[in-house]
């Protein structure tokens, strides 16, 4: 073949070998046969660098197709050629010490599936989940009651599995136990001006009302074949060429619903009504289109759902049920906060679409779908479906919710095994919110046990001091805190979801440990993740390795979405009602309107003071969470009259909390805040506690070398959260 230029000749002549099954580094030539200079660019340097270095995806996450682009320059002309490189996932090189096999109980005669995965302990002491291949397949029906063992192997290995099974005539009847506390509606609580929580919420309100609702609807209307009304397309993760488009619209619905609930501002209800009506029009248009099923609602076609059922991996598809969950959750939040019946109507139709879609699938296929890294991520759609059941009493929603049961998470959590290592953090936290809601809807105890054990494992062994979890979005080995510090720690949306789970468990059990974690996370991660502007930007990660700085982004990511909501959810964690007792859980200036309570806090020299004032008579008692008290609470007996006032104080001193895996490294607490030292040094700084003095302003300190302030106050500076101390 004759080529017009040397560059074209060299582009055609380059051969990189078999790119369909790549396991090793590629040799990328820098010069073509005719002398052209060649430059290379990879579409994903995580797995293939511009120099040809290959890093295979870890076992279980699937192969990756990477586009490698070469530019050929002969000095006069240039041309480009693209190569698609299929990089195989790594082999399962795990070194297993033992397989943990919690006994499974099944009913005689029922069609059941053995666990698709089981926890294993490695020789390094890690506990993680591994897929299982059963000798006789996963589908079973046991004829007789009694005990037996099922045999299999860990996938990709020769490690044998012996699973104890107990077969019973019937399962004991389960029912929902009453909650310990009554939830306080958002509309009953108002934040008071002058606090960082109030200011963060006010800034977000300005941003939300500045968003163009037709832009949020652009991809929905395009997919449904409707006029986009001249709106510009969304950007970032919601751009027309991104497969997660539509999720930000769901988050926005939740945000404006919560903003209305916490303020009563009619502008938010009007905005919600317009969006819901428009989405209903899109849903109706989809139902008329060929290839679509009634009830479907998304910002793209049903193709991603089809591909998921073929076990297509990320990034060819990107979490279609996750996106659908955001839309469903937004609709339900609008209904519950504003009372718009159309929001519930649209949600019920979408929920039935989910039920009908999943009901025709083999249960074993569903298990494989949910185990897929990111592609099978479904957010907390099980929670939304259980909510629909609670609102409608239609059993199909509860059945659909159970179809999202994920063995890799439920099986170990149900029996209290921490096998979170290697799991994607925010892929799994919302599933536990769903599990808790499933218990509330059905009384099935395994869901409650799983949610409880999951929370305990995360908070005790996987959470950083600010309450955030995950490094590079992933759970790491239990108690690996200091050794996993990086610039990609503590994903913001993970803390958002941990707080939702925390609130649900607290209402059920009324234990102070839940609200202690909530305080830690609200004051030190949620506040810290928000930019001090009305641009609506939020951190994706909160860097906890010393010397880094926050990056506030607005690319319509998961954390941008939850960031729109987070500052309105604070109201729901300040108060709780309990049989004639009003509980005050957070030291946040606010009012509880029906009871006429007003909280104000004051920073004094060596203590934080809370005053509770009564603007109307109140017959019940009041308990206030005080962390330093033995029981965690101080109680005041009613009744109270107008003008009465309660005063509670908590001592203020700087204290050091060591990291579990490196006791010489840790964080400094001051009241509810964690202090950060301002410094661009990359090695951990050392603070001299003996020389630490309080500066102008009640929350700033200096040891003569470093200035320390609460993490939320830092915007542009480089900082250290984990540091060393002397003089402790």
Image (tube, rainbow, N blue to C red):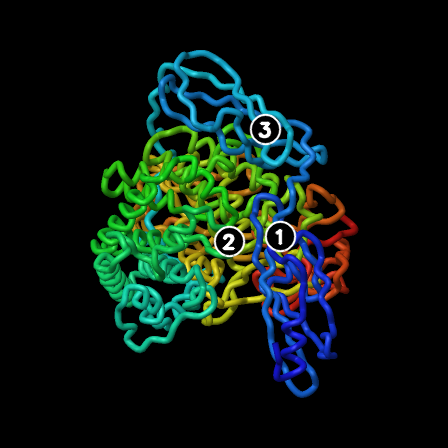
Q: Residue furthest right?
A: 726
Q: Are marks 2 and 1 in contact (CB under 8 Å)?
A: no
Q: Residue 439 occupies which quadrant of the picture? A: top left
Answer few, some or many: residues within 10 Å of disc 2's Cα (few below 14, many 20 plus, some between 14 and 19).
Answer: some
For label 3, the SS is strand
Is the residue 338 above or below the residue 419 in the image?
A: below
Residue 60 percent across, percent down from the top left: 57, 43
Quarter containing the N terminus: bottom right
The dot on residue 314 is 2
| Mark 2 to mark 1 CA distance (whole Å) | 17 Å
Is the residue 297 above or below the residue 556 in the image?
A: above
Residue at the spot of label 3: 153
Residue 47 percent across, percent down from the top left: 64, 57
Residue at the spot of label 1: 21
Residue 669 percent across, percent down from the top left: 63, 51
Residue at point 61% right, 27% down? 99
**Among the two numbered marks 3 and 1 on one chain, the one whose residue lies closer to the N terminus:** 1
For label 1, the SS is loop
| Mark 2 to mark 3 CA distance (whole Å) | 26 Å
Residue 166 percent across, percent down from the top left: 46, 17
Answer few, some or many: residues within 10 Å of disc 1's Cα (few below 14, many 20 plus, some between 14 and 19).
Answer: few
Residue closest to the eye, 401 or 521: 401
**Among the two numbered marks 2 and 1 on one chain, the one whose residue lies closer to the N terminus:** 1
């Amino acid at each position: 073949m004759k080529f017009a230029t040397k560059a074209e000749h060299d582009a055609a002549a380059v051969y990189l070998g078999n790119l369909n099954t790549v396991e090793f580094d590629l040799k990328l030539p820098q010069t073509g046969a005719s002398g052209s200079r060649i430059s290379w660019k990879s579409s994903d340097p995580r797995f293939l660098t511009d120099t040809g270095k290959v890093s295979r995806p870890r076992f279980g996450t699937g192969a990756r197709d990477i586009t490698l682009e070469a530019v050929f320059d002969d000095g006069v002309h240039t041309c480009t050629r693209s190569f698609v490189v299929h990089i195989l996932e790594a082999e399962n090189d795990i070194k297993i010490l033992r397989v943990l096999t919690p006994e499974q109980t099944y009913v005689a005669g029922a069609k059941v599936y053995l666990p698709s995965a089981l926890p294993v302990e490695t020789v390094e002491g890690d506990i993680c989940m591994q897929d299982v291949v059963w000798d006789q397949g996963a589908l079973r029906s046991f004829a007789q009651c009694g005990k037996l063992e099922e045999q299999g192997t860990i996938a990709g290995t020769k490690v044998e599995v012996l699973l104890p099974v107990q077969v019973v005539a019937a399962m004991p009847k389960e029912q929902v136990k009453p909650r310990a506390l009554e939830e306080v509606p958002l509309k009953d609580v108002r934040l008071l001006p002058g606090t960082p929580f109030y200011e963060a919420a006010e800034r977000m309100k300005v941003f939300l009302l500045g968003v163009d609702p037709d832009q949020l609807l652009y991809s929905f209307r395009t997919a449904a074949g409707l006029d986009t009304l001249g709106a510009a397309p969304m950007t970032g993760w919601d751009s027309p060429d991104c497969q997660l488009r539509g999720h930000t619209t769901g988050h926005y619905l939740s945000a404006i619903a919560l903003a209305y609930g916490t303020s009563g501002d009619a502008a938010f209800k009007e905005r919600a009504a317009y969006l819901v009506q428009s989405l209903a029009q899109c849903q109706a248009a989809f139902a008329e289109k060929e290839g679509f099923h009634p009830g479907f609602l998304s910002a793209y076609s049903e193709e991603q759902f089809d591909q998921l059922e073929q076990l297509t991996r990320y990034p060819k598809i990107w979490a279609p049920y996750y996106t659908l969950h955001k839309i469903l959750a937004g609709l339900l939040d609008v209904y519950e906060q504003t009372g718009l019946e159309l929001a519930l109507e649209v949600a019920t139709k979408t929920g039935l679409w989910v039920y009908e879609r999943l009901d025709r699938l083999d249960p074993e296929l569903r298990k494989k779908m949910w185990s897929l890294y990111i592609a099978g991520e479904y957010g907390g759609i099980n929670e939304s479906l259980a909510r629909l059941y609670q609102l409608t009493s239609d059993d199909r929603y509860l059945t659909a919710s159970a179809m999202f049961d994920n063995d890799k998470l439920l099986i170990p959590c149900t029996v209290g095994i921490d096998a979170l290592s290697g799991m994607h953090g925010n892929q799994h936290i919302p599933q536990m919110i769903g599990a808790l809601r499933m218990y509330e809807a059905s009384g099935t105890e395994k869901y409650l046990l799983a949610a409880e054990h999951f929370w305990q494992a995360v908070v005790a062994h996987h959470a950083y001091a600010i309450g955030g979890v995950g490094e590079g979005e992933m759970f790491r080995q239990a108690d690996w805190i200091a050794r996993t510090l990086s610039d990609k720690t503590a994903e913001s949306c993970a803390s958002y979801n941990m707080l939702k789970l925390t609130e649900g468990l607290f209402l059920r059990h009324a234990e102070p440990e839940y609200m202690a974690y909530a305080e830690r996370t609200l004051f030190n991660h949620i506040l810290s993740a928000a930019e001090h502007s009305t641009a609506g930007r939020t951190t994706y990660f909160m860097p906890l390795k010393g010397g880094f700085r926050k990056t506030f982004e607005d690319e319509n990511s998961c954390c941008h979405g939850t960031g729109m909501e987070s500052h309105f959810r604070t109201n729901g964690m300040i108060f709780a009602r309990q049989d004639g007792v009003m509980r005050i859980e957070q030291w946040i200036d606010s009012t509880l309107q029906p009871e006429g309570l007003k909280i104000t806090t004051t920073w004094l020299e060596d203590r934080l003071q809370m005053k509770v004032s009564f603007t109307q008579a109140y017959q019940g008692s009041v308990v206030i969470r005080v962390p330093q008290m033995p029981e965690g609470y101080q109680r005041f007996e009613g009744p109270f009259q107008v003008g009465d006032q309660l005063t509670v104080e908590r001592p203020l001193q700087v204290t050091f909390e060591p990291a579990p895996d490196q006791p010489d490294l840790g964080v400094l607490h001051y009241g509810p805040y964690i202090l950060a030292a301002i410094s661009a040094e990359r090695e951990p700084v050392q603070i001299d506690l003996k020389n630490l003095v309080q500066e102008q302003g009640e929350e700033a300190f200096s040891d003569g070398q470093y200035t320390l302030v609460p993490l939320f106050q830092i915007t542009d500076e480089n900082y250290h959260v984990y540091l060393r101390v002397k003089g402790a």
